[in-house]
Amino acid sequence: MSIQVKDASIFYGDFKAVEDVSMSIKPKSVTAFIGPSGCGKSTFLRTLNRMHEVIPGAYVEGKIQIAGQDIYGPNVDPVAVRRKVGMVFQRPNPFPTMSIYDNVLAGNKLNSKRIKKSEADSIVEKALRGANLWNEVKDRLGKPGMGLSGGQQQRLCIARAIAVQPEVLLMDEPCSALDPISTAAIEDLIHELKSDYTIVIVTHNMQQAARVSDDTGFFNLKAAGQPGHLVEFNPTKQMFTKPDNPDTEAYISGRFG
Amino acid sequence: MTVAADPGADPGVDPKSDLSGRGSVGDVVFRGLAVAAASLILVALAAVFIFLGIEGIPGFNVDAQHYAGQGSFLGLVVPLLFATMYAAVLALIIAVPFSVAIALFISHYAPRRVAVPVAYVIDLLAAVPSVVFGLWGAVALGPYLVPAHAWLAEHLGWLPFFDGQPSGNGRTLFTASIVLAVMILPIITSICREVFAQTPRLHEEAALALGATRWEMVRYAVFPYARSGMVSAVMLGLGRALGETMAIAMIASPKVVISLFIVGTQNPQTIAAHIAQGYKESTPDRLSVLIATGLVLFAFTFLVNAFARWIVARGRAK
């Protein structure tokens, strides 16, 4: 599913956090957002599934369409948007009291849907295989999800997100709490997931953006206290070789940020 | 004389970097006060316990006439203990759903400008003296609930709680339990509110990002996280209900009896109410019987609180 953003500005009450972002995200591709801390890339990511609304007073101006549908339309339920647009967070957050099995099924059980045991088993296996975790946990599905390592927990969260078969998968710095080996496992996974999902990832690690993404967006602040904005949005190859904007080049080559 | 011979003037030590500890006066005084305060509370508790023991133990075995017509200490204390538990549990059944709902409203549903005043008003309830609650229950709420008593006896009479002749003035355990529920509501609400508010944002967002509605988010993220805190809140409420005197003593017309019937004119009497109503016209033997029942109540509430602490500690260890 493609995502079209036109002149989106994001506010927290009176404070304008992000200004005038426009971009077009291709379906079944990986799009990375990079930029210094506080430039609004995570905030922008969270507007793509209306998660920023969790903070009281937050709202969006402009237009965001997923698969041609305005997700801020008057009759749109944010809960329905989030079922179509899954999210993985900076720190792994499996439900602490649930087993691995129940964690994967958590999204499917919402809305008090009844699922047959055989169907549930196949959803769990498919999601865990999809997250490259099945072989590591198939013998202990009944154990708590918190007992896994950090990297495994993060893949469990990815399994939980894809178990409901969303169309888009948002990842907010999914590897920032992980060691290099777990990071590599997640990056491999992102490559595989790309064939089924549209993936948008925020990362602080520019090598990671270069490795996993097809397109990259660079966010920056005009000045301290000013809203963040999208400086440049281009295919990743071009961004890391000959970016259009001198600020992008300065950031990527490590001259600031 | 060399300088080194005088240890007080060792040239190797710069006086500015002297490390020898010298407690200031403030430290010493504060430490003394803290230790004294902590000890005093233990002494007070021990004194109460010793008093109950010395004065109460003879009450276990006095002339049969002093046991309020029950013949023996056990015959007296078992119905009283039953009623104490019964009234407390009834109050909990009423208060817990309300408390949890109010706490959730304050922590997760209401906008801040509504939540803060509501929380404040609930806390104010705890400041109302229990005599006032008792008076309100006996004079205002009881008569108001008379039709409810009649309705319950008529329509739900097949339940043992309502099977019998309903009271004509509402001064029943039913009314008393409602008043008791109002009295324990603030403590349960405020503890639940605190633990709900501490739910990690990460867990809440995990649920919301999956497409959970707010209530589903509460069930997935808030309740599992808050479970042990809710248990301790309920236990503290129970502890308060067990020891509460005035609501029952002033509202329910009493009888020493084991009965589930709560809307009639003869209501099972609790230990605290029994003591409050009996100690003025006591002979020494009768008094020691009352104190002995107090000892039982003390031991029982102590056990309930210890159990609550144990549950809370077990919840934390996970």
Image (cartoon, coloured by chain):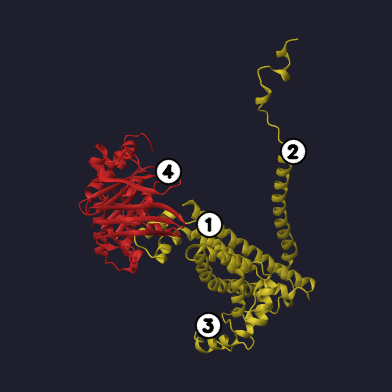
Chain colours: A red, B yellow
Q: Chain of mark 3?
A: B
Q: Give the spatial CA distance, label 3 vs label 1.
A: 34 Å
Identify the residue position indicated by label 4 in the image. A223
Which quarter of the rendered picture does the C terminus of chain A lie within?
top left
Q: Earlier in the sequence, mark 3 or mark 1?
A: 3
Nearer the camera: disc 3 or disc 2: 2
Q: Are marks 1 and 4 in contact (CB under 8 Å)?
A: no
Q: Chain of mark 1?
A: B
Amino acid at circle 1: Val
Which quarter of the rendered picture does the N terminus of chain A lie within?
bottom left
Q: SS of the residue at dot 4?
A: loop
Identify the residue position indicated by label 2 in the image. B25
Q: Give the spatial CA distance, label 1 vs label 4.
A: 50 Å
Identify the residue position indicated by label 3 in the image. B160
Q: x, y (%) of residue B233?
A: 55, 62
Q: SS of the residue at dot 1?
A: helix
Q: Give the side of residue A86 with respect to residue B233, left or right.
A: left
Tell me, yes or no, if residue B70 can be seen here: no
Identify the residue position indicated by label 1 in the image. B312
Give neighbour class at mark 1: few <14, some 14-19, many 20+ (Cα, 10 Å). some
Q: Are marks 1 and 2 on the same chain?
A: yes
